[in-house]
Image (cartoon, rainbow, N blue to C red):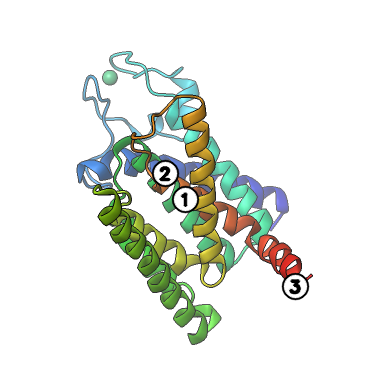
Amino acid sequence: MAPAILWIGTFCVGAVVGSFASVCISRLPRRESVVWPGSRCPRCGAPIRWYDNIPILSFVALRGRCRHCGAAISARYPLLEVLMGVLFLQTVALFGPGVQALRALVLETLLVIVFFIDLDHRIIPNAVTYPGVAFGILSAAPGGWGAVAASGLTALALGGVLLLVSLVGSAMAGAEAMGLGDVKLAAMIGAFLGWPLGAVAIMLGIFVGGVVGIVLLVTRTRGRRDYVPFGPMLAGGALLALWWGPSIVHWYVSRVTG
Ligand SMILES: [Zn+2]
């Protein structure tokens, strides 16, 4: 296959997946089906035809407006499609075509969906994390039984650690500091990344959370008692670990062992 075709195809698949991710982000918190019925204009209710639903291109062709009533379409849709296209390109460039890239792409897509849903609604749907844990463990199979076991055990270990943190935190703060959604998200990240990258992801998530928390406090965007969702931080930590985890582990080990 000509490389140019591979790259254009990878970007297009990413854009289409980004379009589907938008559907998941708006429908999963409302417990609606993500496959039926087809998309409709939120203002006039007109069904959106396939030719008006082509990622990026339709938004440009329609100049960001509904064909029937002229209602503005959020720029968030084409932006997410472009973002996912670039994400797919970057991932295939990093891992090369194969099972490893496929697992990375599935994980990234699930993390993007979790990122926006938790930011908007402060929930992490089981409809993302349960299938995510299952896929993460099963897709380790090409690496042999050892890889499958490592994936499952890491999911259990990281979910267990966050459950413990959640229980202790709730008992000490008297309020829910971390939800069960975060626990299941940590298990999902563990299932995909295995050991030790899964643990690196959680530590990076806590680090990112601390930095974001300090920035929000210093800039007075959020007060000390305001709730900041943890899911987006974990998602960010998982992406960093996925892309640069081995270098981070290598740097850390060389530091410790001198
Ligand atoms: Zn309309």
* Between 6 and 229, the one nearer to me in the picture: 229
Image location (x, y in percent) of residue 44: 22, 19
- Rounded to the nearest angstrom, the CA distance separating label 2 from label 3 is 36 Å
Identify the amino acid type marked 1.
Answer: Ala
Residue found at x 52% / y 58%: 203
Q: Which mark is residue 104?
A: none
Q: Which mark is residue 115?
A: 2
Residue that extends furthest to the top in the rendered view of this protein: 70
Image location (x, y in percent) of residue 158: 42, 67
Residue that extends furthest to the bottom in the rendered view of this protein: 145
Q: Which mark is residue 257?
A: 3
Crowd rating for badge 1 (residues with CA inside 10 Å; few <14, some 14–19, many 20+) = many
Task: From the image, tell me which residue sits under label 1.
Answer: 235
**Secondary structure category for the residue under label 3:** helix
Q: Quadrant of the N terminus?
A: bottom right
Say whether disc 2 or disc 3 marks the residue closer to the N-terminus: 2
Identify the amino acid type marked 3.
Answer: Thr
Q: Is residue 3 left or right of residue 122?
A: right
Identify the amino acid type marked 2.
Answer: Phe
Say whether disc 1 or disc 3 marks the residue closer to the N-terminus: 1
Q: Are dots 2 and 1 in contact, CB under 8 Å?
A: yes
Q: Are dots 1 and 3 in contact, CB under 8 Å?
A: no
* Between 6 and 179, the one nearer to me in the picture: 179
